[in-house]
Amino acid sequence: MKKLFTLLLVFAATLATHAQFSKDTKYVSTSLSGLNLEYNRKGSFRMGLNTDVGYFVADALMLRGSASFKHYGKNADQVTLGAGVRYYFLQNGISLGTGLEYSHLSPNINDLRIPLEVGYTFYLNHYIAIEPAVYYKMSINDFADGSEVGFRIGLGYYF
């Protein structure tokens, strides 16, 4: 009896998870990033705020746009705009994302970067999820100093 109950519970959880990643679902997220965990730009406080919006064009495949603001201390701020795709593995909530983003770091450093991201979606209810992610943003203009590795944690809303 316990095995049957466990099997039914896993089956129900799989169906509920699939509903959030289905075609025509919309997505809005906000998250904190940086938090002094990046490997470059050492020696100054840094913290960022990210906002993402997305739309599932197919089951488990989302097109998304992103905007972020990051403060590095000592009058250095970074603004980033980007677009990309994210794929969700329906079995476990892990997602993989990539895209292209434009970054402006004050006073006058402009950069194109290719972000790569691995994240996890932990649902609090049918619509709201906690989403931690690890990212690598490869700089096209300055690979050594413009690329960054970091961690972000956010709150996503699927509707």
Image: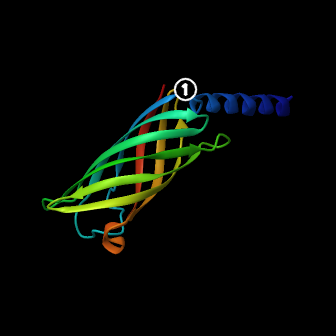
Q: Measuring 33% from the left and 56% from the top, which residue is drawn there? A: 34
Specify the color scheme: rainbow
Where on the picture, by quarter, is residue 45?
A: bottom left
Where on the picture, by quarter, is residue 67?
A: top left
Q: Position of residue 51 (x, y in %)?
A: 34, 40
Q: Measuring 31% from the left and 54% from the top, which residue is drawn there? A: 102
Q: Position of residue 55 (x, y in %)?
A: 48, 33
Q: Position of residue 101 (x, y in %)?
A: 36, 53
Which residue is situated farthest in the right direction here? Answer: 1
Q: Measuring 36% from the left and 62% from the top, which residue is drawn there? A: 37
Is 65 displayed left or right of 106 in the figure?
Answer: right
Q: Nearer the viewer, residue 150 or 147?
A: 147
Task: Give the tally of numbered discs.
Answer: 1
Is 45 displayed left or right of 75 in the figure?
Answer: right
Q: Measuring 52% from the left and 45% from the top, which residue is drawn there? A: 86
Is 21 displayed left or right of 151 in the figure?
Answer: right
Say above or below: 98 vs 155.
below
Say above or below: 53 vs 105.
above
Q: Position of residue 120 (x, y in %)?
A: 54, 46
Image quadrant where one finds the N terminus: top right
Which residue is situated farthest in the bottom direction here? Answer: 144
Q: Nearer the viewer, residue 140 or 118?
A: 140
Amino acid tagged 1: His
Indicate the secondary structure of the residue bearing disc 1.
Answer: loop
Query: How busy is the neighbourhood of tag 1: few (under 14 within 10 Å), some, or many (20 plus)?
Result: few
The residue to which callout 1 is attached is: 126
Q: Nearer the viewer, residue 88 or 24?
A: 24
Is 145 displayed left or right of 98 in the figure?
Answer: left
